[in-house]
Image: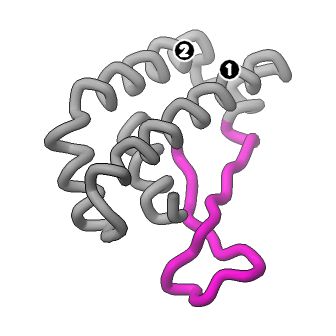
Amino acid sequence: LSGGKAEFILDEVNIACNKNTVPGDASALYPSGIRLGTPALTTRGMKEQDLYKVADFIDSTVKLGLEIQKKSGPKLDDFKKVALEDFKDKIEKLKNEVKEFALRFPLP
């Protein structure tokens, strides 16, 4: 799953990240990695155990992205279209789980 696809699908479930190049990428235009940060999570009071749950959400979302990619093919535009049309319910379910979890940690 490319960084762009991961960024898109994670954003759809309310998990913020940035696509990012990693060593070995052929071009900065097509990054294969993502960058995640924890300051926003720790500011909300999350502890180590809570971050394991966040990691589970990320893992589930990336796995869903791989499932979408099998159907959409390699192009990002096709990936987005298939995700929003054919995987809407699965995305919404994950989004609701993320939201429910995040509500336990209000902004200071």
Q: Is residue 1 left or right of residue 91?
A: right
Q: Residue shown at 36%/51% (left/top)? A: 70
Q: Amino acid at mark 2?
A: Phe
Q: In front: 88, or 47?
A: 88
Q: Is residue 93 left or right of residue 78?
A: right
Q: Residue shown at 46%/12% (left/top)? A: 100
Q: Position of residue 21 (x, y in %)?
A: 65, 75
Q: Which secondary structure dominates the residues rendered in magenta?
A: loop
Protein image colouring: one colour
Per the rendering, the mark at residue 101 is 2
Q: In front: 1, or 34?
A: 1
Residue farthest along the right direction in this orientation: 48
Name the residue beneath numbered marker 1. 53
**On screen, 23 above or below 48?**
below
Q: Is residue 13 left or right of residue 108?
A: left
| Mark closer to the chain start, 1 or 2 | 1
Quarter-of-image position of residue 18: bottom right
Q: Amino acid at mark 1?
A: Lys
Q: Which residues are magenta?
A: 14-40
Q: In front: 51, or 82?
A: 82
Magenta-drawn stretch contains 33:
yes
Circle 1 or circle 2, nearest the eye: 1
Q: Residue shown at 75%/26% (left/top)? A: 51
**On screen, 17 above or below 3?**
above
